[in-house]
Amino acid sequence: MALPTDVRDTARDRKRPDGRPSGRGSRGRTASAGLHGLLVAASFVAVFPIGWIFYISLGPGEFDYQHPGRILSHATLSDYGYVLAHTGFGTWMLNSLIVGLGTMAVGVLISASAGYAVSRMRFPGRRKLMYTFLLTQMFPVAVLMVPLYRILGQLRLLDSYGGLILVYCATAVPYCAWLLKGYFDTIPVEIDEAGRIDGLTPFGTFWRLIVPLAKPGLSVAAFYTFLTAWGEVAFASQFMLSEGKYTLAVGLQTYISQYNSQWNYMAATAVLIAIPAAVVFYVVQKHLVTGITAGSTKG
Amino acid sequence: MPSPSTTSSPAPSTAPAPAASPPRRAGLPLLSALRRSYDRHWYAWAMCLPVAVVLVLVVGYPLVQGLYLTFTDANSLNVGRTIGVNHIPDSFHWIGLRNYIDVLTGPDNQFWPHFVWTLIWTFGCVAITYGIGLGLAVLLNRPMRGRTVYRLLLILPWAVPTFVTVFSWRLILADNGAVNQLLHALHLGQPSWLSDPFAQRVAAIAVNVWVGVPFQMVSLLGGLQSIPDSLYEAAEMDGASPWQRFRYVTLPGLRPVSSTVILLGVIWTFNQFNVIYLLFGSTDSDGVQILVTYAYRLFFGQQPQDYAGAATVGMLCLSLLIVFTSVYRRWLARAQAEEGVWS
């Protein structure tokens, strides 16, 4: 697989001094084998459950997961056909996409703007805002569930995409704002000053100059918000009431009661759910390390 | 020099506001002070406003309401609701601290066992996750063939939603699942991971570590890459062994990242709902329920649903986390100050 490497990596390799037995970057054959052995083992553990569910999804019988050896001989895609044709999968997927992309758009936008303000402007309440971000990470679902249900009811946002997007934004935005604040801190202030001299408003500076420069940070934030929305179960199952509004997480739960032991269909659905997340992941993965670096070292 | 605390910004202000706001004069009337503050800072506030609105609406206000519920006997029967066109008003009552007393010292005494397990769970998970994450980050930070592929594969558990991966783990850990078949092939014992109380706990921690490692690994990898090479070169000149380089260059260099990811790890693990809820579902698994899932069971697992009880447990969780966070931050600040003396 041809994957983009970090520019930093190669620069670093070149600098490495050679010929020192105990130095970094020089490895004996055994050490090298050990290193690769460890990483292969770790990668195997990381990938195995994901590969396993794909493998199970190829087995047409509902008890195949107990006898994985059988699957190989009669692997078929029939489970996928069933899931796509005879369940609400299309609707759920559409709902999840709307909610996920909505959360991503709104969440990244508002957390970037707040992160920029915290990074570049000094204003009363700034430290409190950062502390509040941390605080919101601590809220257990159990405290918020009933009050949120009532509030969304009063705002007529129950059973609507908007309500769920709002809730997910609140879950994802604090970490994103904090991450982006760290990323903006690494962009030289001179750029802002130049923009201001050219007559841009502070928001204009942010929007026209900083946002384009902050793509790695923004893509990590996008990844994070999307995944938060895509994988959330508890709120979605309480707030999306009508079947036409079920997201994938809720839809998968209806399976459990409906086809109690038909794990093969669930496995196929799970694989189909994982695909969009994996696509988003693949798009942003080369920025992942740099994006998070800034957030955590400068935080 | 910018301090590494989370709230300080190294960047001077480019806002309409000057970099350092002068101390407020004492005699100034409040209104005009507010006005001046508004004139100067409205831009920053406007940019934070959307986030603030969302947080107040979705977190702040519900929190206040949730706190209020803990002093009442609210449950699913007496909470106001709308059925069709009929609106049924609230009919629950103020009962003071009785919920807290019931939860903490009540006859069924469910809180403390869950509390102890939650502590084991949180610190066990975070320690193991951090350790593995750090190990993998160090391995991945070396130049080698195929490292982008390794990195991609190792981050994968983070990219797939937990309800998918946990479902897969459920199949793998089932009585006839892959893990037990492997153990059988090795002639080892085959615990029922999803029903035996002790094995349940081991399984829960293992799965949560699996879910949590990628985040720690990526963050720490970022931290490693930000440590200047010159420090390592200097250490090598001084004849430091690999272990000494790790101990005296890598670990201190990672401290800002580590303190953040450990704090976030503790908070997220303490509140980890998905893994336990999805791994054990509605099966008999009382021993493995952490406070958050226990509260959720109070909330939805019985009739009538005990809203007040669930909110009470939730508030207790929240206060525990707040106490932990402030102690941890104070400890960090002190450690940093002591370090300052030494360097």
Image (cartoon, rainbow, N blue to C red):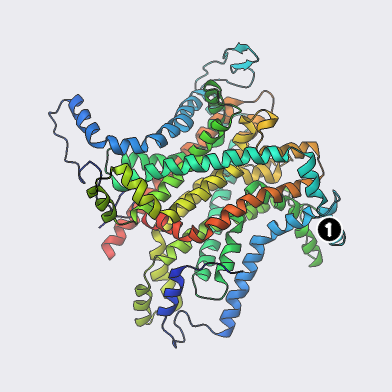
- Horizontal side of residue A290 vs B104, given as left or right: left
Q: Nearer the viewer, residue A1 or A71?
A: A1
Residue B241, percent from left and from top:
43, 79
Residue on which disc 1 sits: A75
The residue at 35%/73% (across/down) is B231
Q: Of all residues shown, which one is farthest toward the bottom? A: A19
Q: Where B83 falls versus B175 (above or below)? A: above
Residue B247, percent from left and from top:
42, 70
The residue at 69%/24% (across/down) is B303
- Horizontal side of residue A299 vs A83, given as left or right: left
Q: Amino acid at mark 1?
A: Ala
The residue at 57%/80% (across/down) is A32
Residue B209, percent from left and from top:
60, 55
The C terminus of chain B sits in image quarter: bottom left
SS for dot 1: loop
The answer to whether residue B127 is visible is: no
